[in-house]
Image: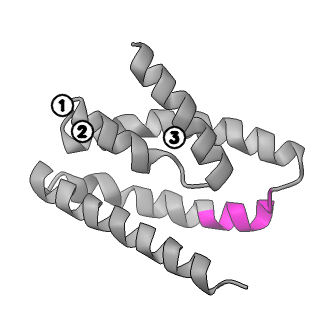
Amino acid sequence: MIIPVAFGVLVGVLSSGSGLGGGFLVVPLLLQMGKEAKVAVGTSFIFILMVAISSLVGHSRVGNVDWKVGALLALGGILGAQAGPLILNHISDQNFKRFFSVLLVGTGLWLFYQSRTLP
């Protein structure tokens, strides 16, 4: 019980400070704990929801929120989020782990490349 809470604190700090959402760390933890991919992804959204609300409040207090752009992104995200669980139901745990691994590595490489090309 202590490990998930401590991990949640760490991921909460990283998520609210980077905007990455936390699922990229929570899903691998849940997979390591033996959860099926579908359950790991679904369960991670409880964490993401609570951290997102808390982060929104914190960032809003210091004026770091563009409400119009955020709302437009959210609209698209809400529509797209309905397709995710349907797609996930047709992917094996093994293929999900492979896809998720490639996504994480690709995102990391992209961020690294972007950080090198900025002034």
Image height check: is 113 above or below 61?
Answer: below
Which residue carries the number 3 mark? Answer: 48
Q: Which quarter of the rendered picture does the C terminus lie within?
A: bottom right
Q: Position of residue 107 (x, y in %)?
A: 43, 69
Which residue carries the number 2 mark? Answer: 31
Which residues make up the magenta segment? 65-73
Q: Where is residue 72 in the image (x, y as percent from the top left)?
A: 66, 67
Q: Can residue 6 be seen in this view?
A: yes
Q: Label 1: few (<14), some or many (≥20) within 10 Å?
A: few
Residue lying at the far top of the rendered structure: 1
The numbered mark, 3 or 1, whose residue comes first in the sequence reads 1
Q: Where is residue 68 in the image (x, y as percent from the top left)?
A: 77, 65
Q: How far apart are marks 3 and 1 (CA)?
A: 20 Å
Which residue carries the number 1 mark? Answer: 34
Q: Which amino acid does label 2 sit on?
A: Leu
Q: Which residue is drawn at the image coordinates 83% and 56% (left, top)? A: 64
Say what secondary structure mark 2 lies in: helix
Q: Can residue 92 be seen in this view?
A: no
Q: Which amino acid does label 1 sit on?
A: Gly
Of residues 78 and 50, which is closer to you in this image? 50
Tell whether label 2 touches label 3 (CB within 8 Å).
no
Residue lying at the far right of the rendered structure: 62
Q: Position of residue 81 (x, y in %)?
A: 42, 57
Q: Label 3: few (<14), some or many (≥20) within 10 Å?
A: some
Q: Which residue is drawn at the image coordinates 39% and 13% (left, top)? A: 1
